[in-house]
Amino acid sequence: MKPYLLVLLIASLLPGHIHSQTADAWVTQGRTYLGKHDLADADNCFSNALTVSKTNQTANAFYAITRLLVLPNQPPGSNFLTRLGLPSSGRNIYNWTAMPPKDTNGLVLAPDGVNANEFPAQLRTNVLLAIAGAISNLSLVTETNFTVTLSSNETTTVLTTVDYGDLRLIQAGLYAAKYFTYTLNGQDFNAQLTSLRALYQSGGLTASRVLADYPQLLTVATTNDLPLALASFTNAVNTYLLASEFIRSRATNDVRLFNYDPDSLQTESNFRSVLQELKASLTGGPQVLALNTNLTVNMAPQFADRISFRGLLPKFDGNAVELGSLPDSNFDGVVDGLTLGDVEGFLGKHLTMLPVGYLPEFSTSNTLSLAFTTLQGHQYVLENSTNLSDWQIQTNFTATDTTSTLVSHHSPGLSQLFYRLRDDTQ
Amino acid sequence: MLRLKRFTRLSCRLWAWAYLAAGILPFSFCFPVAGDELLGFVAAGVDIWQYDSDEAAPVLELRAARLFTDHERRGFFKIGLLPMLVAENVQIQFRSVSGLTNVLADLPPWMVGATDSHCVELRSVELFATGSDAIRLKAGLARPKQDGIWELKSVAVFAGAKQTFSLPEAQFQIVGPDAGRLIWKLGGQPQAISLFNTQNPETP
């Protein structure tokens, strides 16, 4: 290397080099890189701007975003993507083409030795740091009249003005991401991806099989992060309420990154109402939902107890849910007032729900009482058979409760009869 | 061939006026629908007639009460980064169901999904053939997709003045050999009907 190049290199590494230009100049330079979609250099410039002036509002706003966008190309993120088998080429956030390798049938290959619990761990160890940093940067944008106009080159779509309300909304989203990361990280996801893929290939990948093969899956792994999850949740709610108020109070002809939608007036208002009640429950105990006074909510148990996701799951038969097997329709006290029928009705919109028979009761008058767990509103067909091979319809009915009881009369000479209940809902 | 009948009010901050000045307004409905040039675009009372080369009467008339720019919604908010063109109270009337494939395929490209599919939304759409007892398709919302399909919401099909059936969601094939085909799902099973096929009518 020629001596003058070496001097230049050393000079560029010295702190004095960063201070050789103003924070605003670094921001301008960073935006030029951003317009050219050079995220790494843009991120570096915004970082330098903050070295010169820690409180520069515009630099904080840009650095909050770019430090997240560069994650896939920084060593921890890049190494993890490589570990997952993603090719190093095509990891361009503006035109992402790097996809996991597939077999000849188009099925994604599971990377050798990768465990599902590496995903929440990666989030907790690396992504969360960047999120926390971005939140800190956004916290330093304190002027409510702050605006910055992004060119179409910078946004890749259209010229857009970002203001204080937009940044608060992004910050609220980042707090929410922190809350979900802490919550996920508290659960056990210990399962080898290659084993799951093998099950899938053999047609055996079902909820019941996975839960049976991994008895610790979705149990509590750690409660260390619960206080951090609580703080993130509270901050997410507070920041969202602030952002929403700001955005709703803007002049109607102001077009910003996030804009108030009159069609969402009611639903957004409902959302805020629920958020406020959830937050109030952390300090004031169970809160009656204004939207449905039959329900009370209480977020406190989630941050105080060892709630495991697995403990809230119903029993599965394959991928179907056994009706009546939901262990706790109040989800460990988080929601009170939900009935078993409410929860199963909701699950029934998305999953197959299997009726389950109770032990039959035989009376002295040759009548058999058959009780089944059922889904309200569903149509069922009761069939019987003497040999488990030939089935005939005995009756059909529409369930009006979570349990349906049928009475069957038998001739005295009948030695055995088998029954099954089939969901015949169209 | 497209001819513009009238343009009662047109205002566009950036480039629709440039089209006017250049005298190429009759062709302006082939505009791209993304980018800064879309911002602030407003037009009202738009009629487009489509002619076959060998016929004096139009084979298709397209009316839109209003064209304007809006933004796509994500969650509770409209996103400033995602502008879209909205056509409101759209009526598409074709004189004959014969050759419907060609007629629909010649709709403006932005309307059949030939451009960026996320940037156009048709609100309150009616599609019908001339005639008092003709089949009439109405949809509260239509979004052209890139494969020549409209994603429809709040769909109702009429025969004359009588509503024959309604659907919360459906797809409508707007180009290709199956143009005029309405597709939806019932109990997870796909259903379809060729709405304007008088030769081989189907019933849902």
Image (tube, rainbow, N blue to C red):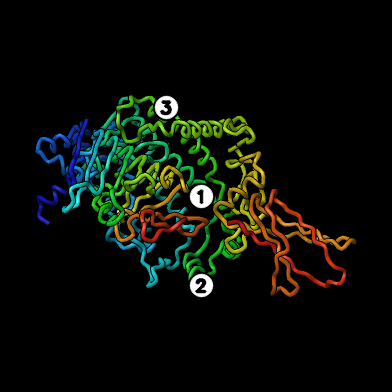
Nearer-the-camera pick, A148 or A262: A262
Image quarter in which the C terminus of chain A is found:
bottom right
Residue at image mark 2: A202
Nearer-the-camera pick, B19 or A51: B19
Element type at marker 1? helix
Q: Position of residue B150 (x, y in %)?
A: 35, 50
Q: Earlier in the sequence, mark 1 or mark 2?
A: 1
**Residue A245, numbered label:** 3
Type of amino acid at the residue the image marks with label 1: Leu
Residue A52 shows in this picture:
no
Element type at marker 2? loop
Crowd around label 1: few <14 · some 14–19 · many ≥20 (10 Å): many
**Residue A394, numbered label:** none
Residue at image mark 1: A184
Parent chain of label 3: A
Q: How many marks?
A: 3
Crowd around label 2: few <14 · some 14–19 · many ≥20 (10 Å): few
Q: Earlier in the sequence, mark 1 or mark 3?
A: 1
Determine whether label 1 and label 2 are within 8 Å by CB.
no
Q: Position of residue B54 (x, y in %)?
A: 16, 53
Q: Position of residue A347 (x, y in %)?
A: 58, 51
Q: Earlier in the sequence, mark 2 or mark 3?
A: 2
The CA span between labels 2 and 3 is: 53 Å
Residue A113 shows in this picture:
yes
Q: Is residue A346 left or right of residue A165?
A: right
Crowd around label 3: few <14 · some 14–19 · many ≥20 (10 Å): few
What's the residue at 54%, 69% (across, down)?
A204
